[in-house]
Image (cartoon, rainbow, N blue to C red):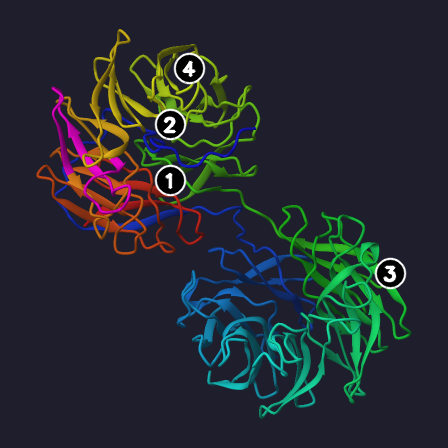
Amino acid sequence: MTRLPGRSQGLACLLYIAAAVPIAQAQTTYSETVLHNFALYPKPKGAEPGGLIRDPAGNLYGTAAGGAWNQGVVFRLDTAGRETVLHSFAGIEGVYPGESVARDEAGNLYGITTMGGTGGCQNLFNGCGVVFKLDPAGHETVLYNFTGGADGAYPQYGVVRDAAGNLYGTTSAGGAGGLGIVFKVDTAGHETVLHTFTGKGDGSYPNYLMLDGGYLYGTAGCGGVGDPCSWGTVYKLDLAGSYTVLYAFQGGADGRGPIGGVVRDANGNLYGTTEFGGTADQGLIFKIDPAGHETALHNFAGGAAGANPAGNLLRDAAGNLYGITVDGGTNDGDGLVFELDSAGNYTVLQIFTGTNGDFPETGVISDPAGNLYGTTVEGGGANLGVVFKLDTSGQETVLYSFPSGVDGVNPESAVALDAAGNIYGTTYQGGSNNLGVVYKVDATGHETLLHTFTGGDDGIWPMAGVTLGAGGNLYGTTYSGGASDKGIVYKLDASGQETVLHAFTGEADGGNPDAGVVLDAAGNLYGTTEYGGVGEGVIYKLSPTGQETVLYKFNGGYGNPSGVILDPAGNIYGTESYGLLYKLDTTGNFTVLYTFGGTDGQTPNGLALDSSGNLYGTTEGGGACPQPRGCGVVFKLDPVGNYSVLYTFAGGPDGRNPLGVVVLDAAGNLYGTTEYGGTSDRGVVFRVDTDGNETVLHNFLGAPDGNEPYAGVVFDPAGNLYGTTHLGGKQKEGTVFKLTPQ
């Protein structure tokens, strides 16, 4: 298989419809609608679950990644194994919920999110995390927004709740030294910092908390012996904030790096685990008595016996301890569930092998009958994690396997529209094989996958968009795949059935097409390849039955051509990335119409043609912009060869580095996109009028509406503009958007 290609010049020149809708546009204000957010293996039901709690009726509650916006969920699993997503997080209400939730008698759930909210942290979601309450109907209330200062930032491990309704937890950052805090949030949403970690004797980077007998108990993953990077501590904290280190790990036989919490027995002994250290440096189970003396109860040895415990321990009434290891077992180290009885006998209860789960991280809980419940962050049918039950005989039942949707990601191509307003396009990755899809999005934003590429003869990586033909047929190319792994030209009928019209060999017929095809009136297809011929690519023609004719082979320093367009007489026009604009007439004569020099543009993209024979396009670089490679231009070439720069991008609010094809309205205005620039440097949709004046119609912002619109726009009969962004949107994997004139 060939390498996955990067973006190639001209790949946005995927679709040229000679009859592109010539609607005059007088309006200068547009309203954007995101019709579809692409998601890498969308996880509407969640994925990678955290820890569980159980209500008196036997329902299980937990948190997971994924969700409607891929920013996390809180879920409930009933006793029949039916999952309900109680809440999907998005942005200012929090992003990425912590590893567990707490529940009150009325059924409200409480927890934290690691990011999001309205705090001041400068990250992808512009927030430092929140403390939230979720009522039984799934309505969220943000109780507190962390700001990233002395009040803490990035909580991870959930909260514990006292009888008065106060919530207690830890943050992994923030505080005076940036090493985390222990906090209290009261029922009115007021935060009190109970302890700020210094990274010295008290530890740093705190983990889970336990509330018992009016005291908080926990572990800190580092610090303890005078260095923020040392081996961690076990501590006690009263509710007034008086802090005591009960034990500081030395990093050797006594263990190092606790990443779970502790449990406490009636005599005041504490039990927990360290991820590393012990006799084999694979972690251990420890006991700390009220006098602060540590005993290593079990040393993990790796292999089938497990390694690297994590999460919280569970202790039953008989004094038996239960927990998980992230590594070890018999299937490439995918983790296990263990028991350490009160006499010190160690038993492996369950080894994870894949279909029954992989990589447990957050410990187990039990019901009154002694059954154990837990989660794994991978494994199951879609490899997105499971909820499992272990009965008292050690028999495992997978109660729920988190499912995946299938979607494309990172569209790089222009879209096509049919008369009913449906949108068609491709993504070069994503789908069930992560090798690209052909999709349809209807006018309401509902997506249908028409074809998922499998990596065999049907092709890999459709970098170009599709062209609509008679009867609802779609035509396109893939960069790789096919019999020789050099790409194909394909046809999809209205039912999604694929026919490979031509498989490139990489020899004289060309190889690796990174641009699409255009149709003539007789049903012949025309396109280009990046390689093959004599090494620099070819221009080809395919008959309706797939018979290929090579019309031209690039050589002599010319190559890497973009897609092509046709005039009414059948002449072919295109560009190549070394800086040429060319014509190939119907007798096979190749003519260089213009050579780009730098200030007039550099690295041209695809072309558009008006009824008078003028050619229009953009260049990715060049122009007068001070950037090293320039910011690009919009140009015109008239039928007698006079070249003019209509607009030079300055690289700021006006945009920079256009990659796609421009489209024209009836008045001669040009519309297109830039990859970067604009108010947020995430690209713009622009219009350039016949006098060379540019208007920015839309500035992309990134996470809400997309960024890096590579491929230009198309019109519908009402004057709406449609396109794609390569990245951004709610799932960060690209969007299909619509701009409506106001």
Q: In the depicted view, which residue is nearer to us: 24 or 630? A: 630
CA distance separating discs 4 and 1: 40 Å
How busy is the neighbourhood of tag 1: few (under 14 within 10 Å), some, or many (20 plus)? some
User: Which residue appears at 54% of the width and 61% of the height?
Assistant: 73
Q: Tell me if 167 is positioned left or right of 563 in this view.
A: right
Q: Is residue 27 above or below residue 549?
A: below
- Quarter holding the N terminus is top right
Residue linked to disc 2? 515
Mark 3 vs mark 2: which is more N-terminal?
3
Residue 482 locus on image (x, y percent): 53, 22
Question: Residue 268 location in percent, x, y?
Answer: 78, 87
Circle 4 is placed at which residue position? 533
User: Would you say 220 lies left or right of 113 here?
Assistant: right
- Is residue 552 within the magenta segment? no
Whether residue 101 sits left or right of residue 622 in the image: it is right
Q: Which residue is under mark 3?
A: 393
Q: Residue at 62%, 83% (x, y): give it.
A: 202
Question: Which mark's residue is nearer the viewer, 4 or 1?
Answer: 4
Tag in front: 1 or 2: 2
Residues under numbered marks 3 and 2 in contact, where contact means CB atoms less than 8 Å apart: no
Quarter where residue 200 is shown: bottom right
Marking on residue 442: 1
Q: Nearer the viewer, residue 700 or 596?
A: 596
Callout 4 environment at 10 Å: few (<14), some (14 to 19), or many (20+)? many
Q: Would residue 257 be found to the left or right of residue 683 on screen?
A: right
Pointers 1 and 3 in contact (CB under 8 A)?
no
Q: Earlier in the sequence, mark 3 or mark 4?
A: 3
Would residue 715 be seen by someone viewing this image from the given angle?
Answer: no
- 3 vs 2, front mark: 2
Q: Callout 1: helix, strand or loop?
A: loop
Q: Amino acid at mark 1?
A: Asp
Point out the stretch of residues depicted in magenta.
Answer: 619-646
